Image: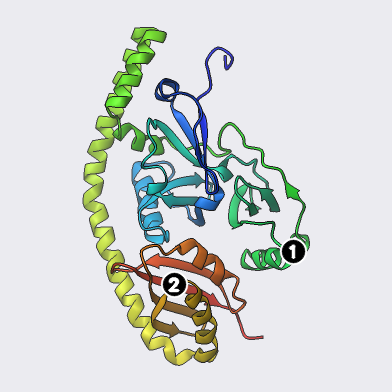
Amino acid sequence: MSRRFPNRPQSVLSAKRGVERRGGPVERLVLGERVILSRALCHFETMNALPGGQSLRRYEAAKLNARARTPIADPDFYFDWGTDQVGVWSWPKSLTSDLTDFEGEILPETVLHSPLQDGARLMKAIDGYEGQVWRDGQLRASRWWPNQPGDADWANFMRVSRMTGADQFRPAVEELVLAERPAHGQPYTALLDRVKSISLRDMAALALLCIAVPGLYLLGQWAHLSQTRASANAELSALSVETAEISEARRSAQAASNELAAYASALNRRHPAELLASVSEELARFSIRLDAFEQNDDQLALNLRADADFAPEALVRAMENNPLMNSVRLEPGRGNGEWLLTAQLEALQ
């Protein structure tokens, strides 16, 4: 069956070479294009999967949670759904917003790698190299380097990923091989986002398809999509009221967390001057201003102000290499150019 129908054009978006399009405009319109995004352009983290199986409410809640956690200001997302964990890939929308004749899907290159059951490996990527940690058949940690990492880089990645034993030694580089489809299929709720964005170009594609396949079959498919779209819009309207309450609760929780952090400053174990000197050196490299510094028993919080061309992913990678901290997270603040960086402090030796 696969020999009778042509495969969709598969383009590549590289940090070094830019976009490399495949297929012509008509082929991309009719078949739908897949854009494979370089690991160098993506941010990855994991979050706990919400209970309840597949549902639109669970899917929308995951998107809200991911938007609050990503360090990217205006992101697009891809969710790698597992049993108890969700891998969240994010990247700036601006990377693909100006692609002409684009009709299709965007996939981070890593989701097309063959999965491991357990362990760590070093992969050759479209741009540079990627370290991966797998548990129970799902990716739990990822680190990207522009050049092949040294032994110290790999050991630091293993420390942050809480890996021990044989995985501490840097493995041989595995060549880049991309599968035709992701190892974990997307739930039906993820497809509703694409149904909602049906445009005139989509209608033109359907018209072209009607020339090549039986009209009655396509008419039945169109009716099914229209019914699914109407049902999804009705459920989304009801969900928007509930998500407003969730957003307000999150803002209240953040305000309460800031007050608790201020009172907890009396529990310091490590002298603040040691950490302040360490982080100030890294911030100076990125031309970032430090507005506030809080150190609790085993937590560090920094309020930062950066320029518009600031690269959040580069700062996160630099801070993760600091031997005094781990589990670094960077979130946008309330004002323009404001960021909140939090980290777990390493225990005193």
- Distance from Cα at disc 1 to Cα at disc 2: 28 Å
Quarter holding the N terminus is top right
Q: Residue beneath label 1, please?
A: 168
Mark 1 vs mark 2, foreground winner is 2
Kind of element beneath mark 1: helix
The residue type indicated by label 1 comes to: Gln
- Left or right of residue 196: residue 166: right
**Figure coloring:** rainbow
Whichever of callouts 1 and 2 sits on the residue coming sooner in the sequence is 1
| 330 vs 84, nearest the viewer | 330
| 13 vs 156, nearest the viewer | 13
Name the quadrant containing residue 207. Answer: top left
Q: Residue at x 41, y 42 (%)?
A: 96
Q: Residue beneath label 2, please?
A: 341
Task: Please tell me how crowded label 1 is: few (under 14), some (14-19), or many (20+) other residues with Cα within 10 Å.
Answer: some
The residue type indicated by label 2 comes to: Leu
Name the quadrant containing residue 236. Answer: top left
In the displayed structure, 144 sits above or below 307; it is above
- Left or right of residue 233: residue 104: right
In the displayed structure, 95 sits above or below 101; it is below
- Left or right of residue 277: residue 114: right
Image coordinates for residue 69, horizontal then vertical, percent = 41, 61
Image coordinates for residue 24, horizontal then vertical, percent = 46, 23
Task: Please tell me how crowded label 2 is: few (under 14), some (14-19), or many (20+) other residues with Cα within 10 Å.
Answer: many
Image coordinates for residue 138, horizontal then vertical, percent = 60, 48
Residue 54's label in the rendered image is none
